[in-house]
Amino acid sequence: VLAGLLGFRRLAVRHGRSIPVRCWLPWAATFGWYGLVDVLPGWFVLLQLFHALQYLAFPLRVEANQHAAASTGAGRVRLHMALYYLALVVVGGIAFIGPSRLVLVSELTLPLAAMVAMGINLHQYFIDGVLWKIRNPEVREALFGHLQLAGSAGPTPSRRH
């Protein structure tokens, strides 16, 4: 925790301004989850579910950028994205809750739920490791094509740090 706080402080000093909430809040929330899971171990399952919902920001951004490029009108994009998000949450809910409802033999419920959770986690590992490579220009455009530099008319150019 101390190293993170010092890192944020150094970053603020280097840039001469305070660190935005969207940068430090996820970091702080991580420690909140550790405390909650320590006190209530059963919440570990919900932690994975909430992490999956948080992760949806990436495919949602890609979908929004692609739909906005092909559509006219902000209202249509908002409706499309609301329906898209709802569909993702419903499918995710079926993946997490469905297997336990389908199994009639109670001895198989826990192992099947564990296998589904492991499959989802392996899938996420694959997606993180293969598809979301920011150095790939197509991925970078799909994720960040909606951003613009100050004083620029076009999308943010690709940069490596």
Image: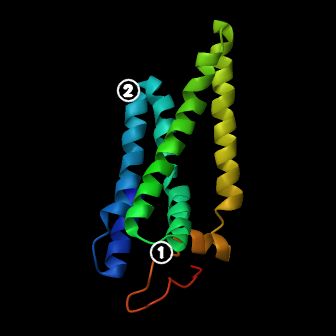
Sequence-wise, the earlier of marks 1 and 2 is 2
To which residue does mark 1 refer? 146
Q: Decide: is 97 above or below 65.
A: above
Above or below for 56 versus 46: below
As shown in the figure, which amino acid type bears the numbered disc 2? Val
* Secondary element at tag 1: loop
Q: Nearer the viewer, residue 34 or 107?
A: 107
Q: Place residue 33 in its image quadrant.
A: top left
What residue do we see at 47% from left, 36% from top? 47
Residue 131: which quarter of the image?
bottom right
Q: Which residue is drawn at 41% across and 70% down?
A: 73
Front-most of 27 and 77? 77
Tell me where residue 83 appears, x and y as whole percent. 47, 49
Q: Label 2: which residue? A: 39
Residue drawn at x 50%, y 83% is 155
On screen, 51 above or below 40? below
C-alpha distance separating marks 1 and 2: 41 Å
